[in-house]
Image: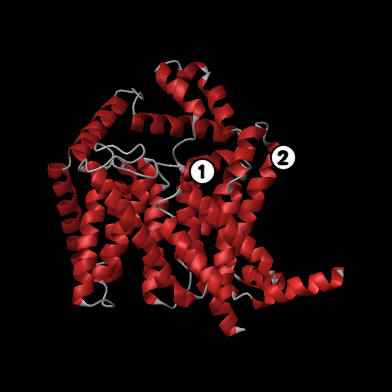
Amino acid sequence: MYLCDKTDSNSIVERINFEKLYFHTTLVFAFILPLSRAGISILTALLILLWFIESDFKRKYREIISSRLLTLILIFLAYNISSFLWSSNLDIAINIVEKIPYWVVIFVLATSIKKESIQSIVTAFLLGMFISEIIAYGVFFELWTFKNATPANPTPFMMHIDYSVYMAFSSILLLHRVFSKEYTLKEKIVLFLFFLTVTGNLFLSIGRTGQVALVAGIIVMSIIHFRLSLKSFFISFFLIFTIFTSAYNISDSFEKRVSLAYSDIEKISNMNFNSSWGIRVAYWITSYNIFKQNPIIGVGIGDYMDKTKEELEREKYSHLHQNVKTFMPKYHPHNQYLLILLQLGIIGILLFLYIIYKIFTLSIEDKEIKELSILFGTIFFVSCIPESLLLKQFTIALFVLFIGLFSIFSISKIEQNS
């Protein structure tokens, strides 16, 4: 009887069209990405569940180890988990490790999605951003209220920093398609109008992280289309000048954030770190001193807050404002690279930088997807400078979706050559 039931269950699994199931689940995942925290969790779990139900682990294992990028990510994750051994704050360590299942989506997509499906998945993501944008503009123009979004900060589903990264990537993706030769004039007009609304939304919010990343994205996009030339210089300068000047004159929020940035810089020059940018500079100072004491393997995945608190208790930080000394031990250093350096030392940061290098140098035969991978990497890893994006659900989900899709090409290329 048991054998019969087992055979029946096997036959049911064999009748499942996993290729279509993965594709449609990933389409929904990409669409829901900017819209729902719960949706991200549910679809992440569903993708992983499908992957295990399908089994075929020998093939998946061979494909994963055939890709140097995927192998590096595995090593990086294993090193994160192993740092439990020298972490004393297990509560924070467990909280961080609990986010590792999101990273599994990279391996699911890389071994399960066909490369021909990538453009449809990217379009689904843009459609989700379009819905999010409609809600954001409705809040801004006070047509409706939505959760915690306000006219002064119309970010409907996530905090402003995370949303700014989503909008910066969407903006540069749309602008890249406008400059591409792959689209008709009618399509480019629609894409350009979408670009204008997304970019406008970016500067209506208070997220400066995405605004800074957009500058880097525009420069890289200009170089992609016009190489390193005077033309690319003038185009990137014109776009940056036009976008930021228009935003400064139109958006009260952006004007205030620019004024605040000038104020922060002035305070920092006077050794006053009691400001948004000032606290980030203070983290650089404390992190460097902590790193000097634990340079090779870091303080462990969960101890960065405790070590920051210990460091701030030293006499040489007596000049810091009490607000700064109270805030810093309760949060991450607002810089992904500093955080990894603190947690995992030189070994960890070198692994992470090597992963970034492999992402940028992936051999992708599809020209448009290759360029998209470079633009995504630029936006995301520049955004990692002012914020620890891999600690947050929305930005981890953005990372694993696109890195998973780009990784497909490394596996496909090796399969073709074998």
Residue 320, visible in the rendered structure: no
Which image quadrant: the N terminus? bottom right
Viewer-proximal residue, 223 or 274?
274
Colour pattern of the rendering: secondary structure
**For residue 108, which quarter of the picture?**
bottom right
Q: Position of residue 120 (x, y in %)?
A: 40, 71
User: Looking at the image, is 194 positioned above or below residue 79?
Assistant: below
Which image quadrant: the C terminus? bottom right
Residue that carries the numbered disc 2 in the rendered image? 85
Q: Is mark 1 on a helix, strand or loop?
A: helix
Q: Which amino acid does label 2 sit on?
A: Leu
Q: What element carries label 2?
A: helix
Q: Where is residue 364 in the image (x, y as percent from the top left)?
A: 45, 74
User: Looking at the image, is 390 positioned above or below residue 115?
Assistant: above
Viewer-side label of 1, 2: 1
Q: Please rate how many residues cluster around mark 2, counting C-alpha atoms within 10 Å: few if below 14, some from 14 to 19, many from 20.
A: few
User: Looking at the image, is 315 positioned above or below residue 126?
Assistant: above
**Residues at marks 1 and 2, CA–CA distance in whole angstroms:** 20 Å
- Give the residue displayed 28% in from the left and 63% down from the top: 174
Q: Which amino acid does label 1 sit on?
A: Leu
Residue that carries the numbered disc 1 in the rendered image? 391
Q: Please rate how many residues cluster around mark 1, counting C-alpha atoms within 10 Å: few if below 14, some from 14 to 19, many from 20.
A: some
Q: Position of residue 134 (x, y in %)?
A: 27, 52
- Give the residue displayed 24% in from the left and 60% down from the top: 195
Residue 241, visible in the rendered structure: yes
